[in-house]
Amino acid sequence: MDRIRKAVVAGQFYSSSYQGLKNQIEGLINKKTKRRQVIACMLPHAGYMYSGAVAGEVLSCIDLKDKIILLGPNHTGYGKEFSIMTEGIWQTPLGEVNIDSQLAKDILNGSDYLKEDILAHMYEHSLEVELPFLQYFKSDFRIVPIVFMSDNLNILKEIGREIASVIKEKKIEESTLIVASSDMTHYEPQAQAEKKDYQAINAILELNADKLMEKILELNISMCGYAPVIVMLSMAKELGATKGLLIKYQTSGDITGDRESVVGYAGIIIY
């Protein structure tokens, strides 16, 4: 099978031309923010018009690293439940990004759950949408793409621990960043979405995966990427994280003016 993963939402979620995309991102970042060292972050993955300002604000304040582990939800239903891609190139209008094959294979070998799978990644937008922002800020990084189609809390936490233990074993904590991709509440009135989302956000800021899952079930929060966020929290704690910080929250209603049915977007750093 083709190991080149072509951009599938260029021209829909973001501009399909090099210059157009660069200009688009330029309008969404904060050049005055001071960069800081973080272990992980959570970014939204909607069209840049809606969630780009949140992603831009978060990545503006992060010192990006050479290795980026991308964790996202599987919206398409294709492929395995826990899917990692260990070889190949991902393309965007800003150029190509290589998979860190050695690290990806070590993670695959160190996990009881992850499976090598390209199909899950081919049409899935949740990781692709983060790449142009990362490329804008750094030209030479490699990725490990992993997507999840599971709500099994214990397995998700265990996968986080498995990946963290590979990172510690290889002594690459300093050069690795974890990015979890998730939008928040989908298609509810703004006030209700915000109320629910802040309950989930507070659990994430406490680095409490159990509480996050509890709130999602209790309040029926339609946060699409809670699985990757649970994995990210589990990993980050193993790697020494103690704090979370909300950088920006907004909804689609803040952009469109339609507050009857919104999607929420949160940008968080973990350090």
Image: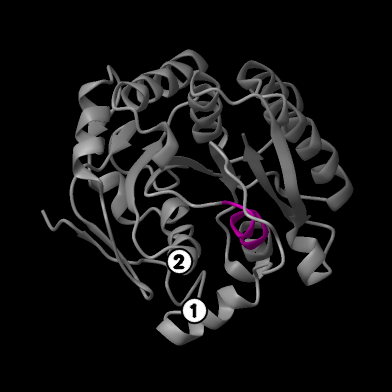
Q: Residue at x 77, y 55 (%)?
A: 250
Colouring used for the render = one colour
Q: Is residue 20 visible?
A: yes
- The residue shown at (43%, 37%) is 174
- Check disc 2 and give the amino acid type: Pro
Magenta part of the chain? 56-62
- Front-most of residues 233 and 67: 67
Q: Main secondary structure of the magenta part?
A: helix
Q: Position of residue 165 (x, y in %)?
A: 36, 19
Q: Nearer the viewer, residue 23 or 66?
A: 66
Which numbered marker is on residue 132? 2
Please tell me the numbered disc located at residue 21: 1
Q: Is residue 202 left or right of residue 82?
A: right
Residue 232 in the image: x percent, y percent? 51, 31
Q: Are marks 1 and 2 in contact (CB under 8 Å)?
A: yes
Locate residue 193, reporting x and y percent.
80, 44
Q: Is residue 154 above or below residue 88?
A: above
Q: Is residue 2 above or below residue 207?
A: below
Where residue 102 sits, quadrant-wise, is top left
